[in-house]
Image (cartoon, rainbow, N blue to C red):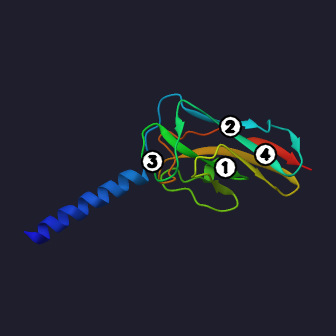
Amino acid sequence: MIRRLAAVGLVVAMAATSALAQGMPAPYGAKAYIISPADSSTVSNPVTIRFGLQGMGVAPAGRVKEKTGHHHLLIDVEPSSIDYDNPLPSDDNHRHFGGGQTEVTLDLPSGTHTLLLLLGDHNHVPHKPPVMSERITITVQ
């Protein structure tokens, strides 16, 4: 009996973990967008990037609340390379703003860069469907 209960508990835990790894549902029409800089603009360091969100709210990572998430700024990342079913990586190209931040000021190497915002749920997993901005291109002098 104890083994059977333990097995059932394990199956339930695995199902819950799998559901969490699939991303929280996003409301219809929700979208992220980059307020500034504008697409095709030429900027100087430090670069301030302001994040926008429509149809959802911002909540810190780890906080489970429907219709919320937190921003991730993807720098020079091809959208086709994103794993939308698992937590986003955290590195120089995948910047996490799990504190609920809505802007960042950073130094980027000189040259052309692409920027993309992608909202993540409490576990850094993109929502279903993904709530993301259009990818913009900037040039850093």
Precedes in sequence: disc 4 or disc 1: 4
Mark 4 or 1: in front is 4
Residue 15, label in figure: none
Please tell me how crowded label 4 is: few (under 14), some (14-19), or many (20+) other residues with Cα within 10 Å.
some
Q: Are marks 2 and 3 in contact (CB under 8 Å)?
A: no
Amino acid residing under circle 3: Gly
Which kind of residue does numbered mark 2 sit on? Glu
Residue 53: where, in percent of width, then height? Answer: 60, 34
Percent x, y of residue 46: 84, 51
Residue at mark 3 to residue at mark 4: CA–CA distance: 29 Å
Secondary structure state at the residue bearing disc 1: strand
In this image, 88 relative to 25: left or right? right
**Considering depth in this image, is 104 or 34 the residue closer to the camera?**
104
Mark earlier in primary sequence (2, 3)? 3
Residue that mark 3 sits on: 23
Secondary structure of residue under mark 3 = loop
According to the image, label 2 marks what residue?
Answer: 134
Give the spatial CA distance, label 1 vs label 3.
18 Å
The amino acid on which the numbered mark 4 sits, given as a three-letter code, is Thr
The tag earlier along the polypeptide, 3 or 4, is: 3
Q: Left or right? Give the position of 23 relative to 89.
A: left
In the picture of the structure, the residue carrying the numbered disc 1 is 73
Q: Quadrant of the N terminus?
A: bottom left
Residue that extends furthest to the right in the rendered view of this protein: 141
Q: Callout 4: helix, strand or loop?
A: strand
Q: Residue 89 at x, y = what percent?
A: 58, 60
Residue for point 70% across, 61% down: 92
The mark lying in front, picked from 1 and 2, is 1
